[in-house]
Structure formats: structure tokens, C-alpha cells
Amino acid sequence: MISKTLHLLFSKIFAAQSAISQYALTELEVTPQHISSIWSATQTVLIVILHDKRRNRNFVLNRERLVVAGALFLVQPVVGVAAIADPDRRAERVHFAKGATSTVVKGPIKGDHYIDYQLRAGAGQTLSVEMKTGNASGYFNINPPGSEVAMFIGSTSGNRFSGVLPMDGDYSTRVYLMRNAARRKESARYTLTLDVSGQALVAIPPAQDALIPGTPFHASAKIACTLPFDAKTKECGAFVIRRGFDGTATVEVRWGEGFKRRILFVRHEMIAADSTEPTVFERRSNFTIVRLGGDERFEIQEALVTGG
């Protein structure tokens, strides 16, 4: 009973996200970039609560947990809402010198200001980022193309990242100060090293595999999915960019209002996803089960990936 109540509560919280954000902007004078901190912290806390509920049948949402939630709201990093016009955000395009695969950028950051370093890369390439700074509250996140949901969060994983990319497009390395330091108007100087290695996995040209008109996708399908805060199996939309006829492809799963997950397969094996959660996959006769953490599960048909 408690589990059902929690799931219902969490669903209603996130359904009301837009209205709550607007209230925070207009009535509480919270800046746009810090609203995202609250949602990131909320998701983190609720996932912890759910996982603990599963381990402990005597679970009670006690005062100590609410204190932890409140503390996370204050210190979680900036991970979203940059789409809102924001005077504290600066975006810079990163270019490599001819023949180079890496570059170094340096700069200062202060208070609520943050910088998005945008770097174009392809599916199958490896992005490596390392930041050095004298301020212990200085971190970076990585946002995948067209998304404000971070696939890497420096404050929980450290200031070094290396991973295979699941999708083509602009990846944003977001440099920021944690909320506690930003409110004190602290500053930090940093050195950021960005490297892209390996060959991109090129999409099959339309002459060999027709595209859905007006999109980069070769095909779409409905797949079975299980999503955060809802244990029931639902139906999600899935779109594929095939990069070979050997089971190499990027699958983009969509649900809700703008939520998406990109998953890269190479020769039928899942190689990467734009998620902070640990990933595992299990091949069945005609589909693959992909799990990200304990709350996301997708059943991706073989025919969608290969075109067979």
C-alpha cells in the first residue's frame, strides 16, 4: 500500500513540474538554472526512497529523510533548464585544431554563472573530459544532444569522464559551481581538457535504407517499457538510426512530454546510453531487454535494429 501511494505521489509531483517551476520563478525568485537543481535532487531522493522501501518493509518517510532531501536541494548541481533565457549562462562552441582530437580551455567562473562548452561528436566515438580547479565546489556535467537531463554528473562521479557516445550531435560540457558555493558568490579558475577519439559510426544512407520523411530515423515502432516511478509496463515510442545491417544502430526511446533515452548497439550488443545509471542488457530470441539502473527497462525488437 505504501509503495503504491509513493508511486502515485511521485507521478503527481512530476506531472506538476511545469506549474511548480513557474511558481518558483515568479513567487520565490528562484533563478531558472537552480530550478533544475531541485528537480535533479528530487529525482535522486525519490529513487533512493523507493530502493530503500524495497529493501526495508518497515520503511517510514521520517524526518531525517526529509532533512536529507532538503540538503540535496541546496547543494545539487545545475543540470537543466538552460533552454529558458538565462543571463547566467554562456555557451561556447569548441573546435579542434586541424588534425587534432583534443583541446584545452581555461577560464574563471563565479557565483551562479555557468558555461556550456558545446562539442559536436558522432555515435560510437569516445568523449573524454577532465577538469582541474582549485575550488572543491567546481564541477562539470555532460548533457547529450537536445537534452537538459545530464548523462554525467560531476558532483557525484568526480571531475573525470570517458565514455562512448550513443548519438550524433552537440554534447554540452557544463561547468558550474555547486549551489552552496554559488550562493556565497565564490569564484574558481579551471582547466578543461576535452578529447574525442575513434571513428564515428555513420548512418546508412537513404538510398540503401529509406528514412522517415523529415527525420534522420530509418524506422519507428512501439516497444514495451518500464519507467521511473511507475512499475507498470507501458508502451513507448522507439526510433532507430541504423548504422549497418549487422545490428549496429542508435535507438531513441521516447515517453511522456519530451523525455527520451538514446541507446547504442554494435553488432547486437548494447554499448552505450545517455544515462547516469549502470546499464545491462539481455538478448532474447527476437528482442533485447535493456535495463538502466533499477527503474528503466526497455524491450527493443531485433527487427527494429536490423531492419529485418
Image (cartoon, rainbow, N blue to C red):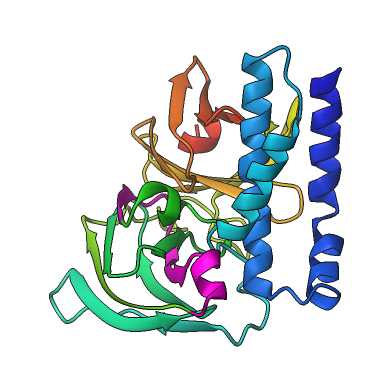
- Quarter of the figure that contains the N terminus: top right
- Please, is residue 189 above or below residue 180 in the view? below
Q: Residue 118, relative to residue 42: is it above or below?
A: below
Q: Is residue 65 visible?
A: yes
Q: Nearer the viewer, residue 103 or 170?
A: 103
Question: Is 96 on the left-hand or right-hand side of 85?
Answer: left
Q: Nearer the viewer, residue 111 or 289?
A: 111
Residue at horizontal 32%, vertical 48%? 164
The answer to which quarter of the image holds residue 132 is bottom left
Highlighted magenta segment, given as a residue range: 160-185
Q: Position of residue 84 (x, y in %)?
A: 68, 77
- Evaluate whether residue 221 shows in this view: no
- Does the magenta run of residues contain 128? no
Q: Residue at x 47, y 58 (%)?
A: 206
Residue 143: x percent and y percent? 48, 61
Is residue 180 on the magenta stretch? yes
Residue 60, percent across and down? Answer: 76, 23
Residue at x 37% of width, y 52% of height: 165
